Amino acid sequence: MKGLPTYCNPLPIPDIPRGCDEWLIPQDGMFDPMPRPTELTGTDYRSISDPTVFYWQNKWYLYPSYGMAWVSEDFCSWKHISTSPYCPKYSPAIIPWKGRFLLTSWQCPLYVGDTPTGPFTRLGSFIGLDGKEFLVTDPALFVDDDGKIYLYGFNMIPQKGSRFAACVNLGWELDPDNPRQVLQGPVEVQRMDPQNHPWERFGPGNQNTAFGWTEGIHMIKHGGCYYMIYAAPNTQFANYCMAVYYSDEGPLSGFICQKNNPLTIHKEGIVRGCGHGCVEHGPNNTLWAFYTVAVPYLHNYERRIGMDLVAVDQNGELYCPHGVTDTPQYAPGVVDEPVAQNSPLLCILNEWHHPVASSVFAGRDTIYASDGSALTWWQPDPEDIAPTLTYELDAPYDVSGIRLFWREIGLDYDKGILPGPVQYIIEYREELPDSPWLTLLDCSDNAIDYNIDYRSFPVRLCSQIRIRITGKPAGLQIGITDFAIFGKMSSTVK
């Protein structure tokens, strides 16, 4: 299987949008990029989260919070297509409709477009059976095989005698000829149950047995069964996860909490807090979970996105056969039996290594580039015009991939200090101490804005690896949140 294309989490999605959580609520509907209100304080950050992925004509279309949209034709690399409107606030949802596409989002009306990337035209708010207009929090749209259309969202219901409200996921059937109009509903399809579902309990230790956000619903039909995916207990926690109910009856009734929950959860490392997303079809009728990754350093809602393989077990329940992954995995559609094995079995070779740097900014030590945390980073001295970071591996290894997670210090969109491409060269030595430095990866002409940059390359025997940062966006200081070197023990080493 050597040479097969791979991907790695968190996904290397280009052009990650500006985080704008503090000024989403007052806006009416979706909007294009806009200036930050002058009365707000705090450091600029980037974020991408809450993904809905739409499989259409053998492509994936990714619709996340903060901006739209991204397209993948090879199922491991993504291209940004700026839509109009651009910012969906949170949790966009899309379905095909009469040769066109219906789109909505968090507390937003319904839109329609001629293509999956728009432009989208506003149709208006949803209309209940009582004739009143309404909007939905964390909406999901679903179209069944018979053409019937359904809307989902969550609500908070006060509980008598309790300081906590209940999170309830609701569903509506919509008129397929006038999709703003409700034909049935709201119907309660799932209610939080933190007493019996530990993953729903609020808090980083799931300590609150009376409350937990159960949000971000997504519906998919597979093998004749309806699967309702939802998120709990809150987005900034490392225990943020996705769980599943399923129904053999229909899209509004008969939902049972599956025993195999949560579906996605990972509490440690770079890929953690794996909640609020979706499960979507991919090539060869495979299933893939897309989820939010928590990196809440500058803001509770600073996030990225990951994906992993999903399968159906002998009981008809969804599960991730390889769990949540943080090492290279084969691209969807390239192996015949991905449930059995879907990776080249590479390890992170340099985790918790202490590299040698050309310089260190006070408090941003070199260990932070490989300590497995998204909340720390190595930063060179601002006067260092050619920063380097050098790792000595424990033995000669066959190396075939790297992941870089850049930390951008000093972002200020309103002052024109913007994110952008980082240029770098990665070099290696086959043997220590005197073998020459050879080029492993030359990205000195990189023109793509990758905040997370994953690269694979032909296998090389390496005893030492260094990165040289050769270029960065004007005005920014660049640090490394994570530099992972992927490989395995060489069969030539005795």
Image: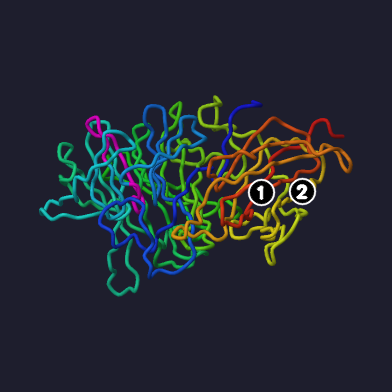
398 over 420 or under it: above or below: above
Q: Which residues are magenta?
A: 86-102
Mark 2 packing: few (<14 Cα in 10 Å), some, or many (20+)? some
Please state which amino acid type lies under the numbered disc 2.
Tyr
Query: Is 117 situated above or below 182?
Result: above
- The residue most toward the left is 131
Report whether 177 appears left or right of 328: left
Is mark 2 in CB contact (under 8 Å) with mark 1? Answer: yes
N-term-proximal mark, 2 vs 1: 2
- To which residue does mark 2 refer? 391
Count of marks, rendered view:
2
Amino acid type shown at disc 1: Phe
Whether residue 346 can be seen here: yes
90 falls in the magenta region: yes
Residue 142 image position (x, y, % from top left):
29, 40
462 lies left or right of 219: right
User: Which image quadrant for residue 196?
Assistant: bottom left
Instruction: State how the image is colored.
Output: rainbow
Instruction: Find residue 123 and report its horizontal and vertical position in percent.
Output: 19, 45
Residue matched to label 1: 483
Residue 145 percent across, percent down from the top left? 27, 31
Q: Is residue 320 left or right of residue 244?
A: right
Image quadrant of residue 173?
A: top left
Question: Which quadrant is home to the N terminus?
Answer: top right
The answer to which of 435 and 243 lies nearer the viewer is 435
Q: Is residue 343 magenta?
A: no
Residue at 22% x, 46% y: name it: 122
Q: Residue at x 27, y 72 (%)?
A: 160
**Dot 2: element:** strand
- In terms of secondary structure, where does tag 1 sit? strand
Q: Residue furthest right?
A: 434
